[in-house]
Amino acid sequence: MNNTIEDTIAAIATPLGRGGIAVIRVSGSKALEVANILTNTNPEPRKAYFKKFKLGNDILDEGILLYFNAPNSYTGEDVIELQGHGGIVAPKRLLEAILSIEGVRQAEPGEFTRRAFLNNKMDLTAAEAVEDLISAGSDSAAKAALSSLQGTFAKNLYEVADRLTKFRVRLEACLDFPEEHEDFFDSGNSEKELTEIIDLTSKTIQIASQGVKLNEGARIVLSGSPNAGKSSLLNALSGTEKAIVTNIPGTTRDVLTANIEISGVPVIITDTAGIRDTPSDEIERIGIQKAIDELKKADLVLYMIDGSSVPVDEEETFKKIFEFEKDEKHILILVSKSDKGMCDECKSLLKSELFSSYKQIHTSTKTDDGLNELRNVLADALGIMPIEGVFIARRRHLTALQTAFEHIIVAKDNLQFGDLVLCAQEMREAQDFIGNITGKVTSDDILGIIFSTFCIGK
Ligand SMILES: Nc1nc2c(ncn2[C@@H]2O[C@H](COP(=O)(O)OP(=O)(O)OP(=O)(O)O)[C@@H](O)[C@H]2O)c(=O)[nH]1
Ligand SMILES: [Mg+2]
């Protein structure tokens, strides 16, 4: 049988594991019947009932029953919540009992929120923000997700969409009745209006791109020759003693990660084995291969050079990094151990053609020298900037916004050339892309992809 929106759905909404309370949510036309079967109660909306949860003579648990009647619920349908004891077994037994009731099935990931969206309880940006709030990796990401959930992103988009509509109404009228709308571009007002729409869209793009950064976080990979000080830096930046540090080259073999925050953006920092052509054993050889694999996933590579000792094969090692990361902006050179001073060979190496075009920062994990500057440089290199009123956004939002923006730019060109038909066409396209973000113009396939990444019970 195909799952439909007519089905009543149920799921455990809290994480499974030891905990005080587990919440099971049921949504759909049979929700009240489920409450009735399990608790022998006809609950009034928004009242808490302490009840035994029973199926037949089998007592499954006891706890609180809540009822939210349609449309005044999260999903817009009849919803009941059973708050029983936490753990793994008790909530599962209760859920199984609920699913044994005819017409009730297990909810798919994100299905409660999908119904909320389909019942116009929230638009798509808010629905996505629910999941983003749950998986927020930093304080700032959580705040930004809450802001989108409360409609800040949508408000910006509706403003753009509203202005597009007003412009299109006049433009289409002018195309249909040219005689009556001669002033359409004579007055220059239309061009001014389009410029304002472009500014507004561009501002929204700027905020959304920061929102995407908060959402996705960034990956920084530490790389370089053995003994350069990579593991010491991971420990210093994360404030932990996660990585083993010794003066034996080839200490790190496996890939180690730590989660840190840079200007509010969650960053995964990865420590890897030092790269050299002569690994001491098979384990180090595999570690070096893993280190190279990590480079492919990096948003930014911090290439570390021990400034205090005479460089050995540094050019060859660096060229290996360069093979995987060609963009200069994505590589920073970190000259470590600044407390020990710099040797002349290293000074001339850094001035050589291969290294001189990269940004170079000097640090010491012994004295913390340069670490604050490093954090600022990292924020800069990752494109993190403080913007008022940041809301969370996803890459699909940014792509749609940028495409809409391009259409508006072309529309303005067409207006300037006097080709109103093409201008109208571009404006229509732009509006569709904006509608795609809020869910006003979204196909079922896209909805399927969006909600399948949610957790079950949400
Ligand atoms: N004086 C000084 N010594 C440092 C600094 N950073 C690291 N060291 C020392 O350099 C040696 C190597 O440091 P690690 O952090 O293990 O170097 P690594 O790059 O992780 O080395 P591998 O794992 O072998 O590739 C250790 O003895 C550290 O104590 C620094 O800023 N100043
Ligand atoms: Mg190491």
Image (cartoon, grey):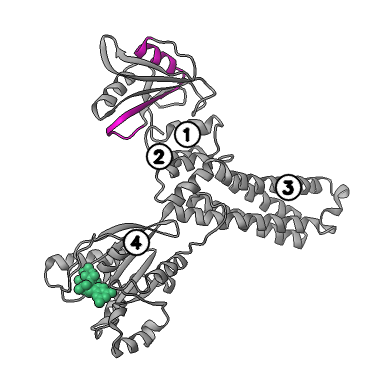
Mark 4 residue element: helix
* The image quadrant in which ligand 1 is located: bottom left
Mark 3 residue element: helix
Give the residue type at disc 3.
Answer: Arg
Residue at which label 4 appears: 297
Residue 323, visible in the rendered structure:
no
Where's residue 270, x and y in %? 30, 62
Pick whichever of labels 2 and 1 is earlier in the sequence: 1
Q: Nearer the viewer, mark 3 or mark 4?
A: 4
Query: Label 4, label 1: how many angstroms apart (C-alpha)?
Result: 32 Å
Give the residue type at disc 1.
Answer: Arg
Q: As displayed, is residue 333 above or below residue 59?
A: below
Give the residue type at disc 4.
Answer: Lys
Q: Residue at x 81, y 48 (%)?
A: 174
376 in the magenta segment: no
15 in the magenta segment: yes
| The residue at label 3 has a CB less than 8 Å from ligand 1 | no
Residue at which label 3 appears: 168
Query: Label 2, label 4: how many angstroms apart (C-alpha)?
Result: 24 Å
Residue at which label 2 appears: 454
Mark 1 residue element: helix
Q: As displayed, is residue 404 above or below residue 443?
A: below
Pick whichever of labels 3 and 4 is earlier in the sequence: 3
Q: Name the one closer to the observer, 268 or 414.
A: 268
The magenta-colored residue range is 14-40
Number of on-image labels: 4
Give left or right: position of 156 versus 190: left
Mark 2 residue element: loop
Q: Quadrant location of the C terminus?
A: top left
